[in-house]
Image (tube, coloured by chain):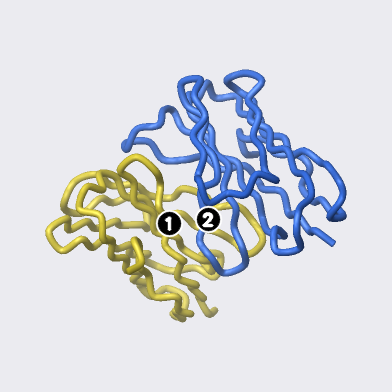
Chain colours: A yellow, B blue
């Protein structure tokens, strides 16, 4: 069983729509949850982190965490073509464990 | 500009070569990491250097050896690599090796072993 699971996609949304990215994890001891954006051939860039159950908003991004369901999600409102990238979910107890990523394409 | 600097950005090496990847951070972070990432795969942890102690992922072959000259530098020495070692090598740092802190990644070194 994979420790961090994401739909690989590709997920395609039209410009201006809401993109919804989902992630489940297996380690109930995970304490911190992160979303990284990775453009093709580039390194991951941290865009959101969340520690507590509920929602956390930062600009067009909202992270949602449900520890009971071992589920974390990322919503991107008003999606832009520049949001097209692979989004990596990561969970951390001691080490950071990454999902394989969901590839998002935002079409103009 | 990233605050974690990796050099070189690209490296092509033969299987008999010895080379080094360099990583430096200027943020006063107390933990540094090396990750390996193959195409369309998640980053895989290779090494952690935190509080003057090096932790090694036991699945990493001995042809990779880390070196930490000081708290802001973490180098990766490469020797007798195989073609399957071709990947993007990512260095990262965090304020501390505790659950709360996320990582800042360098721009990566694209390694090709021929």
Marks 1,2: beta carbons within 8 A: yes
Quadrant in the picture for residue B97 = top left
- Does residue A93 sit above or below A82 in this rendering? above
**x 48%, y 29%: residue:** B31
**x 75%, y 43%: residue:** B78
Residue underneath mark 2: B43
Q: Position of residue B54 (x, y in %)?
A: 52, 29
Relative to B90, A6 lies left or right = left
Q: Secondary structure at mark 2?
A: loop
Q: Position of residue A83 (x, y in %)?
A: 51, 65
In front of the other: A16 or A49: A49
Disc 1 packing (10 Å; few <14; some 14–19; many ≥20): many
Residue underneath mark 1: A98
Please tell me if label 1 and label 2 are on a single chain: no
In front of the other: A37 or B37: B37
Chain at numbered mark 1: A
């Amino acid at each position: 069983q994979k420790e961090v699971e994401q739909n690989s996609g590709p997920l395609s949304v039209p410009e201006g729509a809401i993109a919804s990215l989902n992630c489940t994890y297996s380690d109930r001891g995970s304490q911190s949850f992160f979303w990284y954006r990775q453009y093709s051939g580039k390194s991951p860039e941290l865009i959101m982190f969340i520690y507590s159950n509920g929602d956390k908003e930062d600009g067009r991004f909202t992270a949602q965490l449900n520890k009971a369901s071992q589920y974390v999600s990322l919503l991107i409102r008003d999606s832009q073509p520049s949001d097209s990238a692979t989004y990596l979910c990561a969970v951390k107890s001691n080490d950071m464990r990454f999902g394989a990523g969901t590839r998002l394409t935002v079409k103009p | 500009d990233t605050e974690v600097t990796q050099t070189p950005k690209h490296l092509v090496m033969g299987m008999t070569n010895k080379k080094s990847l360099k990583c430096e951070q200027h943020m006063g972070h107390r933990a540094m990491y090396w990750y390996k990432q193959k195409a369309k795969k998640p980053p895989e942890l290779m090494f952690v250097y935190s509080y003057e102690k090096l932790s090694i992922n036991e699945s990493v072959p001995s042809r990779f050896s880390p070196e930490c000259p000081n708290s802001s530098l973490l180098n990766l020495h490469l020797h007798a690599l195989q073609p399957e070692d071709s990947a993007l090598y990512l260095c990262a740092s965090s304020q501390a090796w505790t659950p709360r802190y996320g990582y800042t990644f360098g721009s990566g070194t694209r390694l090709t072993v021929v």
